[in-house]
Amino acid sequence: MLTLGAVGWGWFGLDLTRELTAGGVLPAGAAELLERRDRARAERDWPAADRLRTALADLGVSVVDGPDGTTWTAR
């Protein structure tokens, strides 16, 4: 679910405003893949999340999951 909070846009609790400025500029189509990966992880569909991580890597986007959520960096 995409929401607008006091600090910016969010997706399933992620602050997309912060992520978009912290990670760099996303290549075309990568934002949709990140959203689909977040949904897959929320649904505990790990094979789909892994396939989407690979697709993002092919676009030059490195994805890291950590205790504070998912971060990405565009290469």
Image: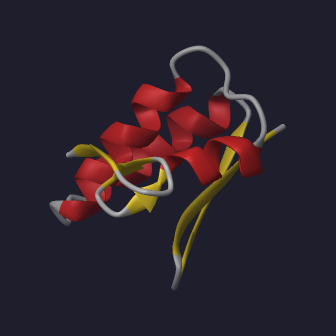
Horizontal and vertical percent position of residue 17 = 57, 45
To which quarter of the image does residue 30 belong? Answer: top right
Residue found farthest to the bottom: 67
- The reply, left or right, for residue 64 in relation to residue 31 is right
Q: Is 63 above or below relative to 31?
A: below
Horizontal and vertical percent position of residue 25 = 75, 29
Horizontal and vertical percent position of residue 52 = 43, 41
- The reply, left or right, for residue 32 in relation to residue 21 is left
Q: Is 29 above or below relative to 21?
A: above
* Residue at the image position 53 percent from the left and 80 percent from the top: 68
- The reply, left or right, for residue 54 in relation to residue 48 is right
Residue found farthest to the front: 6
* Residue at the image position 43 percent from the left and 32 percent from the top: 33
* Residue at the image position 64 percent from the left and 41 percent from the top: 20
To which quarter of the image does residue 21 belong? Answer: top right
- Between residue 54 and residue 3, name the one nearer to us: 3
Horizontal and vertical percent position of residue 35 = 37, 40
